[in-house]
Image: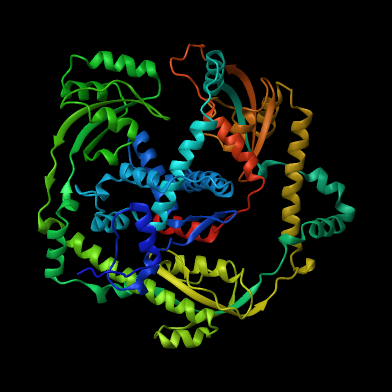
Amino acid sequence: MFRTLGKSKIAFILAILFGISLFFFRGSSRYSNLFNSDNVIAKVSGTPISTNRFNREMQLQINQFNQMLGKSITKDEIRALQVHTRALGTLIHDAIFENEYDKINLKIDQEVIAQKTKESIPELYDSNNNLNERYLSTILQQQQLQIADIVQIINFETRDKYFNEAFFEIGYPQHFSNKINSFNKHKRKVSYVELPLDKVNIDNIIQEYSSNLKTELERYYNENIRRYMSKEKRNIEYFILDKQLLSSNFSPSDFEIEEYYNLNKELYFKNEKRSFIQFNFKATEDAENFKQKIQTLNLQQILDYVKENNIFYSEFENLEANEILKEIAEPLYNLNVGQQSNIIETSLYKHIVILKSIQPPSQLDFYEVKNDIKKIITDTETNNYYNDISAQISEKIINGESLFNIAKTYNLKKMIIENLTQDYNDYDNSEEIIFTNLISDSFTSNKDFVSDVIKINENISYVFNVTNITLSSPLYFEDIVKIVEEDWNISKKIEKIKLELKDNINNKAYLSMLSEKYNLYINDLTLTMNSDNLPRILVNNIFQSEQDQNTQALNENIFYVAKISDIIMPNEKNNLKPTFLTNNLRNSFAEELIKDKKITTNDSLIKAIIEQQY
């Protein structure tokens, strides 16, 4: 049922990468766009970061938080923890080095790349050392990756490992390691108040400007004119390509599904799964005490004990090794049923796991996987057709055909929006991802310029053209004088508090003065560098200030004022493990490299992905 693609660029890439055989999808060379990397979510001096890699890194970050917290984090928590920012930052950091490796012509022999590929994905090769083409197709579907992504990832990781080992693997002297660890783990006791701007009285300031308030407001208006502009408006025409609407045309027969299963039984072999209980502790001492306590207890007695003592734990059922955080998976898969692990450390907690049961590996029955196979075949055929028609449309755009003619050729509905603004929201929830991207792209486009086919995600693309532009212009001061006055009042309140704090930066009684003056409650907290119970900007300021100093931060119209009452350093202990400079040197090197790099991000695409998937 799979026909060869013919000699194409992708066939050549695979011949080099895997060295021995080729992987082809049905449909001839017109489907070769299937192998192109997805939309570019960011670029570092021309080095692209695809949405596939972004989604992969997002899922890795989410899985790590799930494992460390002992639960699945919610969509709100994903946003609050800024997981997408962490994921993009990681990829940009890597892309800085990837771009530099290309720039200095750092290359790895093709045989080494092939060997690293086999080490990373050993199932790609059968016992005769031939490429398992169907396994490759399945893993691309399951991992939501494409050939270009696999080539890029393995090539980069191989070069990066070599570079790190050659230049950055240098250790701190033990004494310095102890000092650094002590500083990183130190805590600060703070007292703070939360002062809403609404409580700040500026009547005396307003009185001071009473005779020339209009002049002052006009000055403020002119200095902040960009805040007071009319909305730019655009008329656009567009059409949408929706892959899901095409999928019903490519549903395989039962015979095709069974044929696929018989030829690929190794893909439907269920790996060993393990069920376990994970106990989580913030302090090593607590973990050690718990482990000593449960040595002679059976599982039920342990569970009774943890419930009585409110010990944080989670139960996990039937997980494969690759579904578990690596630091936990390795010791877990060395346990026997009922056995307890040693203390396992991750960046958030100390863990002890107890293995409950083992589900041995087995071959899945055809009827268990029939629907999965049907989806794989349908998705593959739909992808091929979708990419084919996208390529044809792109070619017509390059040849100068109008959006109207292209839509008519492929029987696509052309839609028109007049007076579109950047805050336009007159659409259904189901259309949000389309308009989020369409608005962003149309407001960075020239008039009468048909766009290329723009991918939003795996299923939806669109083409648009801006037919008219009404530019933004300053609003008349007389029409918005009340708004300007409100903004001016807020600016004066902020200015007043900042000046007052500057005069009282070392005043130990300042918090008490604020508390009495504004009827505020003084809160006491002990913070670490990673504490998240106060705004991040305030935590950073606290750890950059000296003891007994007052510091401040504004967050969402609330002024936080804090005083550092004590700095608590942990007892210095000798480290058994050396502390390497690798990350420090690498980050410092990256800071130098980034000065010569141009970084661009597709913010509208990032926002659309987060809103749709996370």
Above or below: residue 125 compared with residue 356: below
x, y percent for residue 91: 49, 47
Above or below: residue 288 compared with residue 515: above
Above or below: residue 518 compared with residue 173: below
- State which quadrant residue 294 falls in: top left
Q: How many marks?
A: 0
x, y percent for residue 592: 65, 40
- State which quadrant residue 282 falls in: top left
406 to the left or right of 510: left
Report the residue at 23% width, 68% height from top: 2
Above or below: residue 262 compared with residue 5: above
**Residue furthest right in the image:** 211
x, y percent for residue 81: 47, 42
Q: Is residue 73 visible?
A: no
Report the residue at 48% width, 48% height from top: 84
Report the residue at 13% width, 56% height from top: 368
Q: Is residue 496 visible?
A: yes
x, y percent for residue 31: 35, 71
Viewer-proximal residue, 97 or 287? 97
Viewer-proximal residue, 184 or 271? 271
| Color scheme of the displayed model | rainbow
